Image: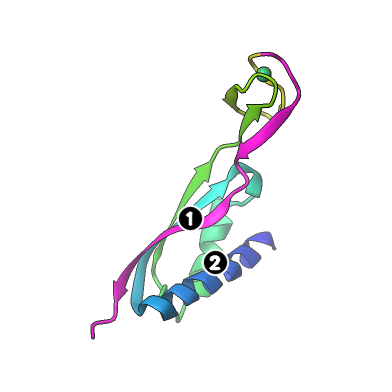
């Protein structure tokens, strides 16, 4: 399953932050997920809950922001939203389109409580 691999990777990053910043508990995790990352948000949330159990992120809310697939035409420089995977420039009908967004998958931010010293 694709999503569990992603969540495991996500927790590696979270654990690094927890260790580096002395985080006591995490209340919210914000993710950016591109359209092309082919992630099912419901599955991702379910995996997250399972992996978070017993960690500082237990019970944390997972917020997923979906990033649409966008492109830029190398011929005329037009930027547009790519729909139905049609890599054709709507301005000049050119086919030399560079993908500019939609492949990302990263941790945007964490809302956390720090350990009191
Ligand atoms: Zn164009």
Residue 73 falls in which quadrant of the image?
Answer: top right
8 lies above or below 61: below
Q: What residue is rendered at 35% in x and 77% in y?
A: 23
- Assess whether residue 95 is covered by the magenta stretch: yes
What x and y, as percent, mark residue 85? 70, 31
Asked if residue 20 lies left or right of residue 117, the reply is: right
The residue wearing badge 2 is: 10
69 lies above or below 115: above
The residue lying furthest to the right in this view is: 95
What x and y, as percent, mark residue 18? 42, 77
Callout 1 crowding tier (Cα within 10 Å): few <14, some 14–19, many ≥20? some
From which residue to which does the magenta span run? 92-117
Identify the mark at residue 31; answer none if there is no mark.
Answer: 1
What x and y, as percent, mark residue 6? 61, 63
Instruction: Inspect this view and state whether residue 14 appears.
Output: yes
From the image, which quarter does the C terminus lie in? bottom left
86 lies above or below 46: above
Asked if residue 10 lies left or right of residue 27, the reply is: right
First in sequence, mark 1 or 2: give its number: 2
Marks 1/2: CA–CA distance: 9 Å
Instruction: Inspect this view and state whether residue 82 appears.
Output: no
Nearer to the camera, 67 or 55? 67
The residue lying furthest to the top in this view is: 92
Asked if the beta carbon under badge 1 is closer than 8 A to the nearest atom of ligand 1, the reply is no
Residue 57 falls in which quadrant of the image?
Answer: bottom left
């Amino acid at each position: 399953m694709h999503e569990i691999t992603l969540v495991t990777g996500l927790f590696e990053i979270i654990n690094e932050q927890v260790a580096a910043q002395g985080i006591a508990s995490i209340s919210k995790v914000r993710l950016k997920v591109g359209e092309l990352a082919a992630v099912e948000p419901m599955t991702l949330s379910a995996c997250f809950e399972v992996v978070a159990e017993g960690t500082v992120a237990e019970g944390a809310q997972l917020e997923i922001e979906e990033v649409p697939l966008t492109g830029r035409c190398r011929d005329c420089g037009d930027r547009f939203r790519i729909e139905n995977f049609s890599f054709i420039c709507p301005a000049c009908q050119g086919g030399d389109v560079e993908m500019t967004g939609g492949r990302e998958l990263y941790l945007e931010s964490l809302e956390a409580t720090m350990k009191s010293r």
